[in-house]
Image: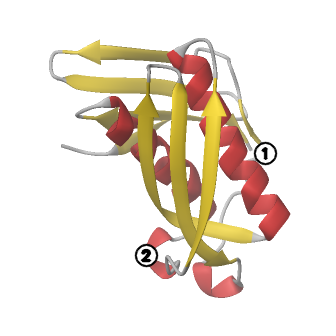
Amino acid sequence: MKSYEYFETTADIGIIAYGKNLNELFENAAKAVFNLMCNLEKVSPKEKKEIVVEEEEIDLLLVAWLSSLLAYKDIYNMMFSKFRVEIKNKYRLVGEAYGEEASESHELRTEVKAVTYHNLEIKKKDDLWVARFIVDV
């Protein structure tokens, strides 16, 4: 099973993430976003940042999670390569992001500015969770 893939959109980049459960789906969505920005294999998971977000709907929870990661990237000047998510009571996420200070050795790529709500969708298809969203670059 692939973790994620990208699709073409006008001026932005679309992401489709997959997971056997919601936790894995959210982890793979984070990997997809950070893979756009750098080579994940070059980022050592040396430092941990904890993130807790709550929302009223599961798709909004995904945007809150990813937006928090982007904020942490900017606040701490870090790139993240490893993620752990535990979704508790449907709309509360307790997550961890592991990475290190951003550097040229991470083979920096496209800057992701934000996660949009445009065409945002999370659904279960057979035994697989699928998230479709667009990031502003």
Instruction: In the rendered view, tell whether residue 14 sits above or below residue 74.
Output: above
Q: Residue at the location (43% across, 26% down)? A: 131
Q: Give the x, y percent position of residue 4.
A: 37, 42
Q: CA distance from mark 2 to mark 1?
A: 22 Å
Residue displayed at 33% across by 41% down: 24
Front residue of 85 and 119? 85
Q: Is residue 5 left or right of residue 1?
A: right
Residue ranking furthest to the bottom: 105
Q: Quadrant of residue 105?
A: bottom right
At horizontal 47% and vertical 41% (from top left) the residue drawn is 29
Query: In which quadrant of the rendered image does the N terminus lie?
Result: top left
- Label number found at residue 113: 1
Amino acid at dot 2: Glu
User: Which class describes the residues within 10 Å of circle 2: few (<14), some (14-19), or many (20+)?
Assistant: few
Q: Is residue 9 left or right of residue 5?
A: right
Q: Position of residue 80 (x, y in %)?
A: 57, 65
Residue bearing mark 2: 41
Q: Quadrant of the C terminus?
A: top right
**Residue type at tag 1:** Lys
Using the image as rendered, state which of residue 118 and residue 68 is in the foreground. Answer: 68
Residue beneath the point at 71% across and 77% down:
102
